Image (tube, rainbow, N blue to C red):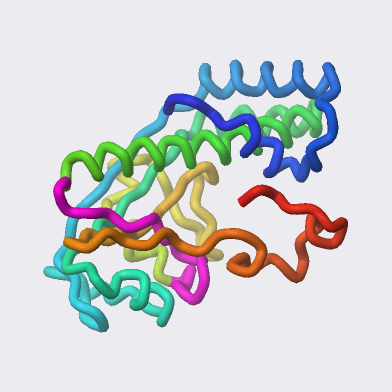
Amino acid sequence: MTQIDRGEVLRYLLWHGEALPEELDAQLARAERRLRQLAEPRVVWRVFDYKPGKPLGGTDFCPAGEEIRAFLADCDQVILLAATLGAGLELAQRQLRLRDMSEALILDAMGSAAVENVCDNLCDELAAQFAPRYLTDRFSPGYGDFPLSQQPWFFRLLDMNRRLGVSLTESGLMVPQKTVTAIVGISDQKHKKRPTGCEACGLREQCKFRKEGKRCGK
């Protein structure tokens, strides 16, 4: 974990870009200090051979969905990865909710930005390791038509419970919640970045920013 994007934190908090009050700025600073004291970032990843519509090499896991198939069209290998900030942060958030919900929400947003930073850093390291081949963006279960019901495969193949201390509830919730799983393709072709912006977002119809004629910046 390196730099936590303050703008990303504010987007998670649905902040619309007005001048930042001193009180909120101080809360953000406290949340980051608390997070850096409590977070224990850990990652795990594995490489598998990939053929469209077939199980990953040596497994029975076949990533489902038309979008993931198109996303990995030029790839012959994939990386399954997982990252977490650990249980200490999760416990602190629960305790904080009993005392100060505002501080708890800010810490939650800070954690979301932080775990994405951990994933970004891991992918940068993997890109350097696999060069001159290319890596795609990350694609996580629950995005597009890549079903969340396939999350258990990540747990089995990455041994997430033992190696990261992360568990999966019957409803598909990962605990600790500041945990990310994703698939990344490996290809000889430079991969186009996934579309971003309002038209590519599955939440565009419910988006509070769009209803007010604004954008979240993603």
How many labels, in total? 0
Residue, x 37% and y 62% (percent of image)? 192
Check if residue 132 falls in the magenta segment: yes
In this picture, residue 79 sits left or right of residue 215: left
Q: Position of residue 204 (x, y in %)?
A: 71, 67
Q: Which residues are magenta?
A: 131-149
Residue 5 drawn above or below residue 36:
below
Residue 87 drawn above or below residue 173:
above
Q: Position of residue 101 (x, y in %)?
A: 80, 33
- Quadrant for the N terminus, please: top left
In this picture, residue 129 sits left or right of residue 85: left
Check if residue 211 falls in the magenta segment: no
In this picture, residue 134 sits left or right of residue 23: left
In which image quadrant can residue 76 be found? bottom left
| Residue 192 or residue 90, whichever sits in front | 192
Residue, x 18% and y 56% (percent of image)? 47
In which image quadrant can residue 166 be found? top left
| Residue 104 or residue 209, whichever sits in front | 209
Q: Position of residue 138 (x, y in %)?
A: 39, 55
In this picture, residue 107 sits left or right of residue 77: right
Residue 29 drawn above or below residue 139:
above
Residue, x 61% and y 21% (percent of image)? 32
Residue 35 drawn above or below residue 156:
above
Q: Position of residue 19 (x, y in %)?
A: 84, 28
In which image quadrant can residue 113 be found? top right
